[in-house]
Image (cartoon, coloured by chain):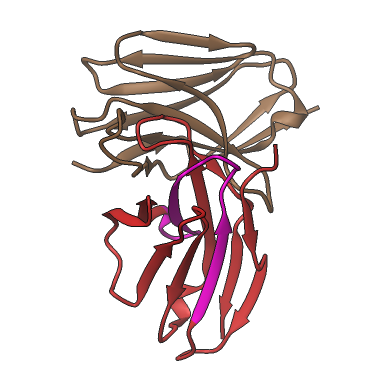
Amino acid sequence: QQQVKQSPQSLIVQKGGISIINCAYENTAFDYFPWYQQFPGKGPALLIAIRPDVSEKKEGRFTISFNKSAKQFSLHIMDSQPGDSATYFCAASRGGGATNKLIFGTGTLLAVQP
Amino acid sequence: KAGVTQTPRYLIKTRGQQVTLSCSPISGHRSVSWYQQTPGQGLQFLFEYFSETQRNKGNFPGRFSGRQFSNSRSEMNVSTLELGDSALYLCASKAQPTTDTQYFGPGTRLTVL
Protein backbone atom coordinates (compact mmCIF):
# COMPACT_ATOMS: atom_id res chain seq x y z
CA GLN A 1 0.00 0.00 0.00
CA GLN A 2 3.01 2.27 0.33
CA GLN A 3 4.20 1.91 -3.25
CA VAL A 4 4.25 4.49 -5.98
CA LYS A 5 4.75 2.95 -9.41
CA GLN A 6 6.37 5.09 -12.09
CA SER A 7 6.72 4.57 -15.83
CA PRO A 8 8.48 4.63 -18.18
CA GLN A 9 11.93 3.95 -16.77
CA SER A 10 13.50 6.00 -19.54
CA LEU A 11 12.22 8.31 -22.24
CA ILE A 12 13.72 9.89 -25.33
CA VAL A 13 11.93 12.90 -26.78
CA GLN A 14 12.79 15.25 -29.60
CA LYS A 15 13.24 18.93 -28.86
CA GLY A 16 9.87 20.65 -28.94
CA GLY A 17 7.98 17.44 -28.23
CA ILE A 18 5.82 16.46 -25.25
CA SER A 19 7.28 14.31 -22.47
CA ILE A 20 4.78 12.27 -20.46
CA ILE A 21 5.61 10.38 -17.27
CA ASN A 22 3.01 8.38 -15.38
CA CYS A 23 2.63 7.34 -11.75
CA ALA A 24 0.14 5.21 -9.87
CA TYR A 25 -0.38 4.85 -6.14
CA GLU A 26 -2.27 2.52 -3.85
CA ASN A 27 -2.68 4.28 -0.52
CA THR A 28 -5.83 6.40 -0.59
CA ALA A 29 -4.55 8.31 2.45
CA PHE A 30 -2.00 10.07 0.24
CA ASP A 31 -3.03 13.66 -0.30
CA TYR A 32 0.06 15.41 -1.63
CA PHE A 33 1.73 14.51 -4.93
CA PRO A 34 4.95 16.34 -5.89
CA TRP A 35 7.24 15.87 -8.85
CA TYR A 36 10.97 16.31 -8.42
CA GLN A 37 13.67 16.89 -11.02
CA GLN A 38 17.21 15.69 -10.38
CA PHE A 39 20.34 16.49 -12.35
CA PRO A 40 23.51 14.41 -11.95
CA GLY A 41 25.40 15.35 -8.80
CA LYS A 42 22.51 17.37 -7.41
CA GLY A 43 19.72 16.76 -4.96
CA PRO A 44 16.12 16.54 -6.18
CA ALA A 45 14.41 19.88 -6.77
CA LEU A 46 10.66 20.36 -6.51
CA LEU A 47 9.13 20.97 -9.91
CA ILE A 48 5.40 21.07 -9.30
CA ALA A 49 2.94 19.51 -6.86
CA ILE A 50 -0.78 18.81 -6.68
CA ARG A 51 -3.42 17.89 -4.13
CA PRO A 52 -6.37 15.61 -4.94
CA ASP A 53 -8.96 18.41 -4.87
CA VAL A 54 -7.91 19.52 -8.38
CA SER A 55 -7.56 17.45 -11.54
CA GLU A 56 -4.89 19.52 -13.23
CA LYS A 57 -2.21 22.03 -12.32
CA LYS A 58 -0.04 23.93 -14.75
CA GLU A 59 3.15 25.87 -14.14
CA GLY A 60 4.83 27.12 -17.29
CA ARG A 61 5.63 24.16 -19.52
CA PHE A 62 4.92 21.64 -16.73
CA THR A 63 1.46 20.20 -16.08
CA ILE A 64 0.28 17.61 -13.58
CA SER A 65 -2.86 15.67 -14.44
CA PHE A 66 -4.51 13.88 -11.54
CA ASN A 67 -7.13 11.10 -11.67
CA LYS A 68 -8.32 10.38 -8.15
CA SER A 69 -10.64 7.49 -9.05
CA ALA A 70 -7.89 5.70 -10.96
CA LYS A 71 -5.26 6.63 -8.37
CA GLN A 72 -2.99 7.90 -11.10
CA PHE A 73 -1.17 11.11 -11.84
CA SER A 74 1.11 12.20 -14.63
CA LEU A 75 3.62 14.88 -15.55
CA HIS A 76 3.49 16.50 -18.97
CA ILE A 77 6.42 18.60 -20.17
CA MET A 78 5.39 20.68 -23.15
CA ASP A 79 7.90 21.97 -25.71
CA SER A 80 10.62 19.78 -24.18
CA GLN A 81 14.12 21.27 -24.26
CA PRO A 82 17.58 19.69 -23.99
CA GLY A 83 17.94 21.43 -20.63
CA ASP A 84 15.03 19.33 -19.37
CA SER A 85 17.19 16.21 -19.67
CA ALA A 86 17.26 14.87 -16.12
CA THR A 87 15.74 12.20 -13.90
CA TYR A 88 12.18 12.85 -12.80
CA PHE A 89 10.63 11.37 -9.68
CA CYS A 90 7.02 11.35 -8.67
CA ALA A 91 6.23 11.07 -4.99
CA ALA A 92 3.32 10.90 -2.60
CA SER A 93 2.76 11.61 1.04
CA ARG A 94 0.13 12.15 3.64
CA GLY A 95 0.57 15.89 3.87
CA GLY A 96 -0.98 18.44 6.14
CA GLY A 97 1.60 17.84 8.81
CA ALA A 98 0.89 14.13 9.25
CA THR A 99 4.38 13.24 8.08
CA ASN A 100 7.33 14.44 6.05
CA LYS A 101 7.71 10.97 4.62
CA LEU A 102 7.70 11.07 0.85
CA ILE A 103 7.22 7.78 -0.99
CA PHE A 104 9.08 8.09 -4.27
CA GLY A 105 8.59 6.40 -7.60
CA THR A 106 11.55 4.67 -9.21
CA GLY A 107 12.41 7.58 -11.48
CA THR A 108 12.33 8.31 -15.20
CA LEU A 109 15.49 9.26 -17.07
CA LEU A 110 14.48 11.79 -19.69
CA ALA A 111 16.72 12.62 -22.64
CA VAL A 112 15.64 15.43 -24.93
CA GLN A 113 17.45 15.27 -28.24
CA PRO A 114 18.27 18.54 -30.03
CA LYS B 1 18.71 32.63 1.06
CA ALA B 2 21.18 29.78 1.17
CA GLY B 3 19.88 26.31 0.45
CA VAL B 4 20.27 23.14 2.43
CA THR B 5 23.95 22.38 2.99
CA GLN B 6 25.39 18.97 3.65
CA THR B 7 28.88 18.04 4.77
CA PRO B 8 30.97 16.32 3.77
CA ARG B 9 30.01 15.98 0.11
CA TYR B 10 32.01 12.81 -0.40
CA LEU B 11 33.15 10.17 2.05
CA ILE B 12 34.98 6.86 1.76
CA LYS B 13 34.85 4.40 4.63
CA THR B 14 35.61 0.74 5.14
CA ARG B 15 33.30 -1.98 6.38
CA GLY B 16 32.77 -1.96 10.11
CA GLN B 17 33.52 1.72 10.57
CA GLN B 18 30.97 4.30 11.56
CA VAL B 19 30.16 7.62 9.89
CA THR B 20 28.44 10.87 10.80
CA LEU B 21 26.85 13.11 8.20
CA SER B 22 25.77 16.68 8.81
CA CYS B 23 22.93 18.80 7.48
CA SER B 24 22.19 22.50 7.89
CA PRO B 25 18.62 23.36 6.85
CA ILE B 26 17.53 26.51 5.11
CA SER B 27 17.57 29.42 7.54
CA GLY B 28 14.30 29.46 9.45
CA HIS B 29 13.40 25.90 8.57
CA ARG B 30 12.84 23.72 11.60
CA SER B 31 11.87 20.39 10.06
CA VAL B 32 14.56 18.08 8.67
CA SER B 33 14.28 14.72 6.93
CA TRP B 34 16.88 12.27 5.66
CA TYR B 35 16.68 10.00 2.62
CA GLN B 36 18.93 7.32 1.17
CA GLN B 37 19.27 7.11 -2.61
CA THR B 38 20.68 4.02 -4.31
CA PRO B 39 20.40 2.74 -7.89
CA GLY B 40 18.68 -0.42 -6.70
CA GLN B 41 16.25 0.86 -4.08
CA GLY B 42 15.77 4.44 -5.27
CA LEU B 43 14.91 7.16 -2.78
CA GLN B 44 13.96 5.83 0.62
CA PHE B 45 12.91 7.77 3.70
CA LEU B 46 15.14 7.38 6.74
CA PHE B 47 13.75 9.68 9.42
CA GLU B 48 12.42 13.16 10.15
CA TYR B 49 13.03 15.57 12.98
CA PHE B 50 11.30 18.63 14.33
CA SER B 51 12.18 20.53 17.49
CA GLU B 52 14.91 18.02 18.30
CA THR B 53 12.38 15.16 18.30
CA GLN B 54 12.18 12.28 15.87
CA ARG B 55 8.68 12.32 14.40
CA ASN B 56 8.89 9.44 11.99
CA LYS B 57 11.28 6.68 11.04
CA GLY B 58 11.63 4.60 7.89
CA ASN B 59 12.27 0.92 7.60
CA PHE B 60 16.01 0.86 8.26
CA PRO B 61 18.02 -1.14 10.81
CA GLY B 62 19.01 0.38 14.14
CA ARG B 63 22.51 1.03 12.80
CA PHE B 64 21.01 4.16 11.26
CA SER B 65 20.33 6.91 13.75
CA GLY B 66 19.98 10.65 13.77
CA ARG B 67 19.47 13.67 15.89
CA GLN B 68 18.56 17.32 15.62
CA PHE B 69 20.06 20.18 17.56
CA SER B 70 18.39 23.26 19.00
CA ASN B 71 19.53 25.33 15.98
CA SER B 72 17.70 22.83 13.70
CA ARG B 73 20.93 21.40 12.30
CA SER B 74 20.82 17.64 12.04
CA GLU B 75 23.24 14.76 11.95
CA MET B 76 22.79 11.16 10.96
CA ASN B 77 25.03 8.34 12.02
CA VAL B 78 25.57 4.91 10.53
CA SER B 79 27.43 2.40 12.65
CA THR B 80 29.11 -0.85 11.61
CA LEU B 81 29.08 0.09 7.95
CA GLU B 82 28.20 -2.51 5.34
CA LEU B 83 28.95 -2.47 1.62
CA GLY B 84 25.24 -1.98 0.97
CA ASP B 85 25.28 1.32 2.83
CA SER B 86 27.06 2.91 -0.11
CA ALA B 87 24.61 5.54 -1.28
CA LEU B 88 23.80 9.20 -1.70
CA TYR B 89 22.38 10.48 1.58
CA LEU B 90 20.06 13.41 1.12
CA CYS B 91 18.82 15.86 3.67
CA ALA B 92 15.64 17.86 3.12
CA SER B 93 14.23 20.73 5.10
CA LYS B 94 10.95 22.53 5.31
CA ALA B 95 9.70 25.42 7.35
CA GLN B 96 7.26 23.51 9.55
CA PRO B 97 5.92 19.95 9.59
CA THR B 98 2.61 21.34 8.37
CA THR B 99 4.02 22.87 5.19
CA ASP B 100 4.27 20.77 2.05
CA THR B 101 7.43 21.66 0.21
CA GLN B 102 10.63 19.87 1.12
CA TYR B 103 13.89 21.35 -0.18
CA PHE B 104 16.72 18.91 -0.73
CA GLY B 105 20.42 19.44 -0.27
CA PRO B 106 23.05 18.15 -2.72
CA GLY B 107 23.67 15.04 -0.66
CA THR B 108 26.66 13.23 0.80
CA ARG B 109 28.06 10.47 -1.39
CA LEU B 110 29.16 7.64 0.92
CA THR B 111 31.28 4.83 -0.46
CA VAL B 112 31.93 1.80 1.74
CA LEU B 113 34.88 -0.38 0.72
- Left or right, B87 with respect to B4, comes to left
Q: Which chain is brown?
A: A
| In the image, residue A111 above or below residue B59 | above
Dominant SS of magenta comes to strand
The image position of residue B81, as x and y in percent, is: 44, 83
- The verdict on residue A112 being magenta is no
Residue A43 or B96: which is nearer the viewer? B96
The segment highlighted magenta reads: B19-43
| In the image, residue A2 above or below residue A62 | below
The image position of residue B73, as x and y in percent, is: 52, 57
The image position of residue B13, as x and y in percent, is: 58, 84
- Left or right, A96 with respect to B92, comes to left
The residue depicted at 61 percent of the width and 16 percent of the height is A18
| In the image, residue A52 above or below residue B38 | above
The image position of residue B70, as x and y in percent, is: 46, 57
From this viewpoint, which residue is outermost toward the right? Answer: A114
From this viewpoint, which residue is outermost toward the front? Answer: B70
- Left or right, B72 with respect to A14, comes to left
Residue A24 or A101: which is nearer the viewer? A101
Residue B9 or A1: which is nearer the viewer? B9
- The verdict on residue B31 being magenta is yes
The residue depicted at 68 percent of the width and 50 percent of the height is A40
Q: Which chain is red?
A: B
Q: In which quarter of the image is the N terminus of chain B?
A: top right
